[in-house]
Amino acid sequence: MSQRQITFEILRYDPETETEPRFQAYCVPCEEEWVVLDALNYIKDTLDGTLNYRWSCHMAVCGSCGMMINGEPMLSCKAFIRDLPAGTIKVEPLYHFPIERDLVVVLDDFMDKLESVKPYVIPKKQRPIEDGPYKQTPKQLHQYQQYSMCINCLLCYAACPQYGLTPEFIGPAALALTHRYNLDSRDKGRRQRQEVVATHEGVWECSFVGACSEVCPKDVDPAGAIQQMKIASTADWYLEHLMPWRRS
Amino acid sequence: METIESDVVIVGAGGAGLRAAIALAEADPGLRISLLSKVYPMRSHTCAAEGGAAGVARSDDSMDLHFGDTVGGGDWLCDQDAVEFFINEAPKELTRLEHWGCPWSRETDGSVGVRPFGGMKIKRTWFAADKTGFHLLHTLFQTSLKFESIRRFDEVFTTDLLVSDGRIQGCCAVEMRTGEMKQFLAPAVILCTGGAGRIFPFTTNGAIKTGDGMALAYRAGVPLKDMEFVQYHPTGLPATGILLTEGCRGEGGVLRNKDGYRYLQDYGMGPETPLGEPVLKTMELGPRDRLSQAFWQEQKKGNTVPTKWGDCVLLDMTHLGEARILERLPFVHELAHAYAGVDIVKEAVPIRPVVHYMMGGIHTDINAATPLPGLFAAGECACVSINGANRLGSNSLTELLVFGKRAAESAVKYVRSGTTKVDRAAADQQANAAEARVQALFDRPESTETMTAVRNEMTHAMETGAGIYREEAMLKDTADALAKLRQRQTSIALRDKSKVFNTEFTQLVELGCMLDVAQAVAVSALARKESRGSHQRLDHVERDDETFLKHSMAHYQGEDAPRMDYLDVVITKSRPGVRDYSGAKS
């Protein structure tokens, strides 16, 4: 077994007893195949039970364990230690969110924004169960499938400079999910969602840095979704102002 | 202490809890619904299910065939009235999910596709690539956001049920952000807390699967049913225990031993089927219990492949071709590459059986009701039982939909029956006692006992004595070890005294739940002196319908081991027969 002693500098913060965050160092004997989460679990189980972080599935699908690793937003269960540069590994909570405790951030803002974009099928009229499933061809599925892969890990919010500057910005994941439903052949709710997303805090806040798509662990490409929505919103504007008869 | 009054409280916001919440909101917009979870809903372990959800979809399939596969797969320990209800509801629920936006994989004509799964005579597994649980969970969660009457309490950790006058009155839960205890008063509570795979060392289950709801019900006097039946999934990645879906075999993947030999043909599942032409209910499409048991036998014969993380066999999908793998099994491709360093397009991946699912759970009837008035349960934490002694792959996702909805309907009926007034004084008294118990955990004197030691010894005892094969002496050792560990955990002191997001505290409560559940598993296994489905006794190798065509019921006895008694299985139309997975038959 090839073990390596690695020092982890981990942000610690307990609002009950501390006025500001600090860093604490832990030396961990890491196995070759470990991810950062394995090291955190080693610390929690054997060195310091007071360290707090979220995790569950350890297979990059529950989205709980997003954190900053050497300044990059990553899922700690998919951040292989062997892939990180040699030396100390710095672990911090996701940027741009208030810290609740240690590596745990407050998610209220995202949860509110997700709800605001109506991320569910809004059909023209309710389809009875007896009518069976809608037909949806593989091509129609492919239209939105990529945007349905979002695990809400929020790495994209931590990477987005615009969200850091303008917290009102609805942000990458929620906008990608908006786009996901807009593109679904079963959905007729785009106009309802436009009221929220075709605003200054919506798609137009995005300055197309593209950092969100780079850090996405599921290749959702929120930046692409937002650009497509900008184009669609622009088309809406022209239709409304230049060809008002086209709008029913 | 803050008190929140509702008509129905749901504990757990995974697939079953969300389905129940939506059903309640649809039944009556005026109902006050509180949906509690110790995590955010989308973190629930439903998200890790990969392969699919079973429901009759094709014209060559029938309710009778799904019934037969399920009951035979469960080695006749299923309640057949419940199975019949379940399979009849299954296609409706999967269609409903489709209407709500679930991205089911499709045939070229736009109809929903189905894939073969183990133990099934006809293809009937609806799937969304190999991320079915993830899509099902997110579809339900996002759909639930439509309903204003669903009041969510995320990261709220339920510690106690409130029971007085022989009825449920609500529950108590600690808000993790503040450490404050909250009292949730309601005449009806639905437990949807999932499984308890974490009582074993090597499991596909996420960190949160600690049997909390099972322990809550058990301590409140509701028996845990059929707890000895623990499903090992035959294809987990070594080291991490990450699941590679049964869909791998459904799509045509095969299992080989160290010599490249497809060993399943030696265990009553042959003859060997041609590569790339999987035959239903044969070889790799046998049921999970048989496949995991065959691994154990091969290991005994020295036919497994030694790896750093223990003995493995090989799952070979190389003949499927890259295009099919990327279309049907993209997540498996990603997981094997990331966590095992194997490109499944080019080489076979080492795998071994891994603890996956609890067939047993909180005793419920066909209405998802427990014997405690007002308390309902659905999903993996419950045992109806439709899964019997061995669950068929892809029945569990459907189960949480069907019985999540059923629990909601039963709860509404119960609440409307008018006999359900909450006894405020008794509830207050119990809530205060619960709060004092939590405080007592923080006030324990320092000790040398550690949570890690107790947890590791528990999982080791379970693996050693209550694994794929069991026998009297080792089960006794396991049961004894668990009794001692239950004692020892009462002296574990918390080093973290903060009230804010204190996971040392929640882990300690979870450990207590796991120990209670683990003891119920071991004692139930010890008492069942026969082999059936996933419960295989080396000292009682035959199925014994005369004595044990019965559900085991473990009753909580405080510090002592549980008391066991038995309940008849409901047989309506299928008498116990032989489970035949040889390709010899039709």
Image (cartoon, rainbow, N blue to C red):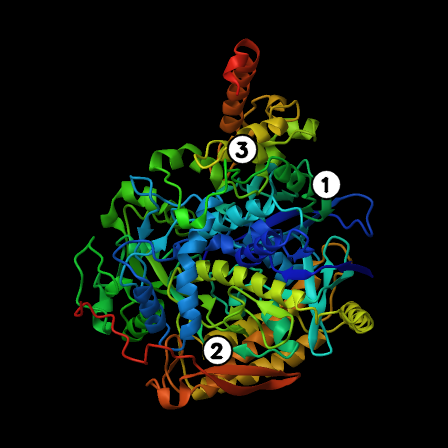
* Residue B252 image point, x, y percent: 26, 54
Residue B324, position as x, y percentages in the image = 28, 44
Which residue is painted at 59% across and 68% down in the image?
B376
- Left or right of B263? Residue B440 is right
Along the line of sight, which residue is nearer the eye, B585 or B94?
B94
The residue under label 2 is which amino acid type?
Asp
Q: Are marks 1 and 3 in contact (CB under 8 Å)?
A: no
Q: Kindly identify which residue carries mark 3.
A: A189
Answer few, some or many: residues within 10 Å of disc 2's Cα (few below 14, many 20 plus, some between 14 and 19): many
- Is residue B539 among what the camera can see? no
SS state under label 3: loop
Image location of residue B568, percent across then percent down: 45, 84
The amino acid on which the numbered mark 3 sits, given as a three-letter code, is Gly
Given the image, what chain letter belongs to the residue carrying mark 1? A
Task: Using the numbered discs, state the Cα–Cα distance from disc 3 to disc 2 in whole angstroms.
Answer: 46 Å
Local SS, label 1: loop
Quadrant of the rendered image containing residue A73: top right
